[in-house]
Image (tube, helix red, strand yellow):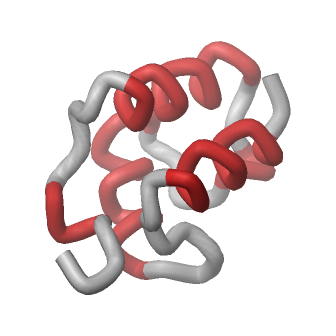
Amino acid sequence: MKPIAIHRIANTMDISWDGDKNFMDWCETIVGKRHLDDMSEPELIMIYTRLKNGKFPQYLIKNG
């Protein structure tokens, strides 16, 4: 898995991820890293799975 997979799913869900403090804070609480490029494949899968399954704070959604 690559960061682009997170970008794509986040975009389809209207979640701001590019330089978004809230998104980076959320990632840090899950895997201990703020930037997708710094994450290993298992860490990216953890983020992707949570997004796909709706296991993220609603404030991450733009205009949400």
Q: How many marks?
A: 0
Locate residue 36 relative to residue 2 in the image: left or right: left
Quadrant of the frame with the N terminus: top right
Q: Quadrant of residue 25?
A: bottom left
Q: Horizontal placement of 36 versus 51: left or right?
A: right
Query: In screen coordinates, is 40 left or right of 4?
Result: left
The residue that appears at 40% across and 36% down in the rendered structure is 51
At x 32%, y 23%, the residue is 53
Among the 4 quarters of the image, the one containing residue 31: top left
Pinpoint residue 46: horizontal percent, then vertical percent: 48, 22
Residue situated in front as seen by the camera: 2 or 64: 64
On the rendered image, what quadrant is the C terminus found in?
bottom left
Residue 47: x percent and y percent? 48, 33
Q: Is residue 19 above or below residue 34?
A: below
Percent across and percent down for residue 5 are 74, 37
Place of residue 26 in the rendered image (x, y in percent of width and height, measured from the top left): 32, 55
View extreme (top): residue: 42
Which one is nearer the viewer's eye here, 7 or 21?
7
